[in-house]
Image (cartoon, rainbow, N blue to C red):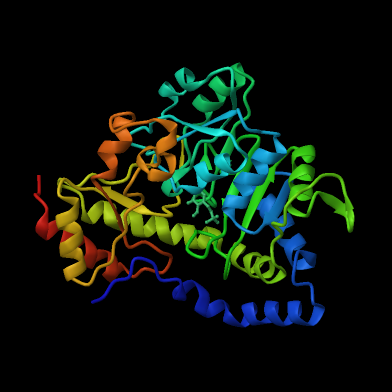
Amino acid sequence: MKIPFVDLSAMHRPLEPEFLEVFTRVLRSSAFVLGPEVKQFEDAFAAYVGTSHCVALTNGTAALHLTLLALDIKPGDEVITVPHTFIATAEAISAVGARPVFVDIDPVSYTMDPALLERAITPRTRAILPVHLYGQTADMDAILEIANRHAIPVIEDACQAHGAEYKGRRAGSLAVAGCFSFYPGKNLGACGEGGAVTTDDPELAHRVRMWRDHGSKQKYVHQFPGLNMRMDGVQGGILAVKLQHLDRWNEQRRQAAAQYQVALAGSDIILPAEMPWGKHVYHLYVIQADDREGLRRRLEAAGIESGLHYPIPLHLQEAYRFLGYQQGSFPVTEAVVGRILSLPMYPGISTDAVARVAEEIMETSNVA
Ligand SMILES: Cc1ncc(COP(=O)(O)O)c(C=O)c1O
C-alpha cells in the first residue's frame, strides 16, 4: 500500500462542479483580479476568523511583508521571530530591510518560548512575530503580556493554523494582525497561490489594501509607491467554496491525529502534544524519533512518504549567516530538527493508511 504524504484529491473531487462554476463565473465576468469573488471570500474569512477585516493577497509571504510595511517597519528595525519555521517568516522581515532576531522554541509546543522573549527585546524591536507552527498556536497570552508591557505590536504567522484556536478564539484574531497562506497544501488552500491578512484595525487593513494595489485606493491615483499583491478572482471563488468545509476537514485531521496517538502509544517515539490553551488543527503531524533517518528510510522502503519541517533552522541557513548566529545559539531548535519527522496527514486519509503507517513505525521502534 503506497501512502502519500499529502493527497488533496479526496477534498477536491466532490467539489469539482462548484470549482468549475467559479471558473465559468469569473471567465464570463472577466473579474480576474480582486472583484466580487475575492470580496465575498474576504468577508467570509473575516467572519470565520473573528476579525472585522480581511485583505486577500497573492500569498502568505505577501501577507507578512505587507503587514510589516503597513506597520512602517523599516531598515534598522528589529523583528523578533523563531528560527524553527518556514523561511518566509524571516524573508518578510528582510524584505522591509529589518533584521530578524530569533528566540528559541518551547520543546513541547514547537512555538516561541515566551520565557526567552523579553531578553531578546532591544530599543530597536518594532514587532514580535510568533508562528503557529504545525497547526497549533503559540502561547499568545504570555507573548502578548510581554509585548504590551513594551508597547510592541504582535503579528501572528497563522500560515499553518487555519481554524486553530487559542482559549476559544481563532488564530488570526489574537493580535494586531494575522497572516495566512492559502498555498494548496495548507488546511485552507487555493488552487494556486493565495494569502490574507486579518485584523480588527481598520487603519491597518486600509494600509495593507493600499500596499497590495500600487499605493492606491482609486484607480490611477497613488498615495505612495506600493506593490502589486492582489488575489485572483478564481482563487477568491475557490477559497469561498472550500472555507465552508474547513471545520469538517480540520475535524478529519484531528481524528487521524487521535488514531496515530493511540496506535503509537507505548513506543519511544515522541508524539505531538495538544497544549492546554488550544485546539490543534494538525496541518502537520510531527513526531520525534532517536533514529529519524533510519525510520525515514524504512518508511520509504515500505512505500510511505514522510516530510521534514524543517531540516535546517533559519539561523544556520546560508541566507541568514550574516546575522552572526552559530551552532549552539538555539539549542532546543537544533535538538528538535535532527529528530522530527512529519507523517502522512490530510483530510480523508483512511484509517487503514494511518494504521499501516503506525504499524510500520511500531515494528521498528523500541516499545517501552
Ligand atoms: C509558517 C509559514 N509562514 C509563511 C509561509 C508563506 O506562505 P506562502 O507560501 O503562501 O508565501 C508559509 C507557507 O509556506 C508558512 O508555512
User: Would you say residue 111 is visible in this rendering?
Assistant: no
Query: Could you tell whether 81 is left or right of 311 in the image?
Result: right
Closest to the observer, 8 or 31: 31
Q: Is residue 48 above or below residue 302?
A: above
Q: Quadrant of the N terminus?
A: bottom left
- Residue at x-position 54% and y-position 20%: 146
**Residue 241, percent across and down?**
64, 69
Total numbered labels: 0
Give the image quarter of residue 283: bottom left
Q: Nearer the viewer, residue 274 or 32?
A: 32
Q: Where's residue 293, x and y in %?
A: 18, 54
Is residue 239 positioned above or below 42 on the image? below
Can residue 237 be seen by looking at this rendering?
yes
Q: Is residue 152 above or below residue 2?
A: above
Residue 75 at x, y percent in the picture: 62, 32
Residue shown at 68% from the left, 79% from the top: 23
Q: Position of residue 111 (x, y in %)?
A: 42, 37
- Foreground of the two, 212 or 6: 212
Q: Is 245 left, or right, of 221 in this rendering?
A: left
Q: Quadrant of the C terminus?
A: top left
Picture quadrant where residue 17 is located = bottom right
Where on the picture, by quarter, is residue 200? top right
Outermost residue on the front side: it is 322
